[in-house]
Image: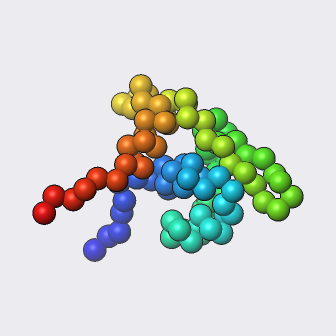
Amino acid sequence: MKKWNFITNHGLVLLYVSHNPQCTMREMANALGVTERSIQRVLKDLEEEGYVTWQGTGKGNIYEVNHTRGLKHELTRDVIVADLLDLLGQKRKRKH
């Protein structure tokens, strides 16, 4: 059976750094089940489009998410990053 996700690696990285702003690429890769090289490419994309900025600290990086940026696709352009992260971060009780 083919493995796939509803949320892309870009969305997952955005969610991960929003909860773990001082994480390393290795930590992200391990948590998301991808390579560090994939994380590096995704972070570059997110930075180039203005979704994430980072600052080097000497020991690593601190990532900051732009919560006011709209999503890219024309169907979701009216949704801002904060709305997406709020939705993905919500924990819902399961109905039995």
Residue drawn at (37%, 49%) of the image? 90
Quadrant hosting residue 47: top right
Tell me how the rendering is colored.
rainbow
Q: Nearer the viewer, residue 67 or 4?
A: 67
- Which percent across, then down, holds residue 87? 38, 43
- With 34 as the anchor, is 56 left or right in this view? right
**Quadrant placement of the C terminus:** bottom left
Position of 31 with respect to 45 (left or right) is left
Q: Residue furthest top?
A: 78
Spot the residue most to the right: 58
- Point 65% across, 69% down: residue: 26
User: Does 34 appear above or below 77?
Assistant: below
Quarter of the image for the N terminus: give it. Answer: bottom left
Q: Is residue 42 visible?
A: no
Query: Which residue is at the far bottom?
Result: 1
Q: Which residue is at 36% across, 30% downward?
A: 75
Residue 52 visible to an observer of this rendering: yes
Residue lying at 42% horizontally and 30% vertically, measured from the top left? 79
**x then y, percent, for residue 73:** 43, 34
In the displayed structure image, the side of residue 68 where residue 60 appears, left or right: right
Residue extending furthest toward the front: 93
Q: How many marks?
A: 0
In front: 2, or 79?
Answer: 79
In percent of width and height, residue 65 lies at 61, 41
Residue 77 at x, y percent in the picture:
43, 28
Q: Quadrant of residue 49?
A: top right
